[in-house]
Image (cartoon, rainbow, N blue to C red):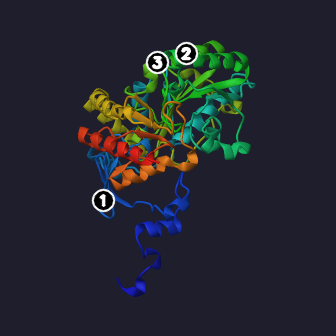
């Protein structure tokens, strides 16, 4: 390159250039003084390749979004086809085939009664849509006093202000509390805390008694209850029994309160069924979907809801009952095309059934870590497996968060070619569905060695 045309911004490695101009999510940027960001140039299947040629097994599906591997040929082809015809069009007053087909497929796939699809662009936005719709529904029906929401302790629903308000992971929420609406918080059915000899079902039923009382006391002012079905992911992959969802659906009906199922992280086969709600045999009033919806390719989310809720907004313009929520990229054709290709893979390759032996193998390998002196729990829900390590196993005493033991596991894993991203002291596996047994062996072995290294002092 001619020196006269050389741009000084381009000097240095990609990581060095990054640190001069970028600010990364969920990151204390000072950490990059000792662990620079890893520059990735390509992906294939369950693997990522760095600009230095080193490869990393993506054991967390790049923040839980990738279902069928990086650079999936089928999704690639769908995007190439769509981009040659229509990249985007305003979705107010206009429509297009990818959006219509995707909505039809989602209505057919999701639990019965969910007949209307509202598109947004990410999971937090989907939660915002659902809580606004619920509030607005009651107002349109003349119940303007129903303005509050019930959430679960340790729940997470995103980081925009409405979504943050109905979540309960203090790491994300505490600082911003002055900006957030007040919500009611019921104890979590998280089965990590069950008594010795108590089953998951027994504990989840016992915990539901708190929710029952809260609904009895506050139903007159509550618009909806919002939960992550079966797995509280960002809260440490904590899990509970489907009976809780079944009881919650019945109670919401009895007290006249909406049920919002946040399936953003747990939908599309992660829990062993297409949607986690299926394991309880329930249909929520709102189902929020995102992450795996496009196979990990493009931002897209959807809120599925009922004809009854849709009808509450359907009236003459002058009545001012319309739902006014939008963003510029609503129903983006490229994202819809990626989602359609993703759903076609599910249908054509019998993915849910094919995942069962993989999930069984992953769970069996991970449970070998139960004997470790510092592993307090190994839990599984479908293709999600979590290993929790603690300071004192007999008392389940956790390490102080300030010790950052999970970061030691993260560093060790990177050194050995695996991308793990522990949540505090919980190492979890949520790999793409294309992972094979040898790759499962590798990720579990590296995690086991990382836990040993993180707990050896």
Asked if 113 appears above or below 49 in the picture, the reply is: above
Q: Which mark is residue 54?
A: 1
7 to the left or right of 260 = left
Disc 3, SS: helix
Q: Nearer the viewer, residue 252 or 26?
A: 26
**Label whose residue precedes the other's in the sequence (3 or 1):** 1
Q: Residue at x 36, y 46 (%)?
A: 449
Disc 1, SS: loop
In the image, residue 388 lies at what x, y percent? 46, 36
Q: Which mark is residue 28?
A: none
Contact? badges 1 and 2 (CB < 8 Å): no
Whole-angstrom CA distance, mark 3 to mark 1, is 43 Å
Asked if 170 appears above or below 28 in the picture, the reply is: above
Q: Which residue bears the numbered disc 3?
A: 280
Q: Which residue bears the numbered disc 2?
A: 205
Whole-angstrom CA distance, mark 1 to mark 2, is 48 Å
Contact? badges 2 and 3 (CB < 8 Å): no
Q: Quadrant of the N terminus?
A: bottom left
Contact? badges 3 and 1 (CB < 8 Å): no
Q: Residues within 10 Å of mark 3 (few under 14, many from 20)?
A: some
Which is closer to the viewer, label 3 or label 1?
A: 1
Asked if 225 appears above or below 102 in the picture, the reply is: above
**Label whose residue precedes the other's in the sequence (2 or 3):** 2
Q: Nearer the viewer, residue 185 or 327?
A: 185
> Is residue 95 at least partly visible in the picture?
no
Asked if 168 appears above or below 41 in the picture, the reply is: above
């Amino acid at each position: 390159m001619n020196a006269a045309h050389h741009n000084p911004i381009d000097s240095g490695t990609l990581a060095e250039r990054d640190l001069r101009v970028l600010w990364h999510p969920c990151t204390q940027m000072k950490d990059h003084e000792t662990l620079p960001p890893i520059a990735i140039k390509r992906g294939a299947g369950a693997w990522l390749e760095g600009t230095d040629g080193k490869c990393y097994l993506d054991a967390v599906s790049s923040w839980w979004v990738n279902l069928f591997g990086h650079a999936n040929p089928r999704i690639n082809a769908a995007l190439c086809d769509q981009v040659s015809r229509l990249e985007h069009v305003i979705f107010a007053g206009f429509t297009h085939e990818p959006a219509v087909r995707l909505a039809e497929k989602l209505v057919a796939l999701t639990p019965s009664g969910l007949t209307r699809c509202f598109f947004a662009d990410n999971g937090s936005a989907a939660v915002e849509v659902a809580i606004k719709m619920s509030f607005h529904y009651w107002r349109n029906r003349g119940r303007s006093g129903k303005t509050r929401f019930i959430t679960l302790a340790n729940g997470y629903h995103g980081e925009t202000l409405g979504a943050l308000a109905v979540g309960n992971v203090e790491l994300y929420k505490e600082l911003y509390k002055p900006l957030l609406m007040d919500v009611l918080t019921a104890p979590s059915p998280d089965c990590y805390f069950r008594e010795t000899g108590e089953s998951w079902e027994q504990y989840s039923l016992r915990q539901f008694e708190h929710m029952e009382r809260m609904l009895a006391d506050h139903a007159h002012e509550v618009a909806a209850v919002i939960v992550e079905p079966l797995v509280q992911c960002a809260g440490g992959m904590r899990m509970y029994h489907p009976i809780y969802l079944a009881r919650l659906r019945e109670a919401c009906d009895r007290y006249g309160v909406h049920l919002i199922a946040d399936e953003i992280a747990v939908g599309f086969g992660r829990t062993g069924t297409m949607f986690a709600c299926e394991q309880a045999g329930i249909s929520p009033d709102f189902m929020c979907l995102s992450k795996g919806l496009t196979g990990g390719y493009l931002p897209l989310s959807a809120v599925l809801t009922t004809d009854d809720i849709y009808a509450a907004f359907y009236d003459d313009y002058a009545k001012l009952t319309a739902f006014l929520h939008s963003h510029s990229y609503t129903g983006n054709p490229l994202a819809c095309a990626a989602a359609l290709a993703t759903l076609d893979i599910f249908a054509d390759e019998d993915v849910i059934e094919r995942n069962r032996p993989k999930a069984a193998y992953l769970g069996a390998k991970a449970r070998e870590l139960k004997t470790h002196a510092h592993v307090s729990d190994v839990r599984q829900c479908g293709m999600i497996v979590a290993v929790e390590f603690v300071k004192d196993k007999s008392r389940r005493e956790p390490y102080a968060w300030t010790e950052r033991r999970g970061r030691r596991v993260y560093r060790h894993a990177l050194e050995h070619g695996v991308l793990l991203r522990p949540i505090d002291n919980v190492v979890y596996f949520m790999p793409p569905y294309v992972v094979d047994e040898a790759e499962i062996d590798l990720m579990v072995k590296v995690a086991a060695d990382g836990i040993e290294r993180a707990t050896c002092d």
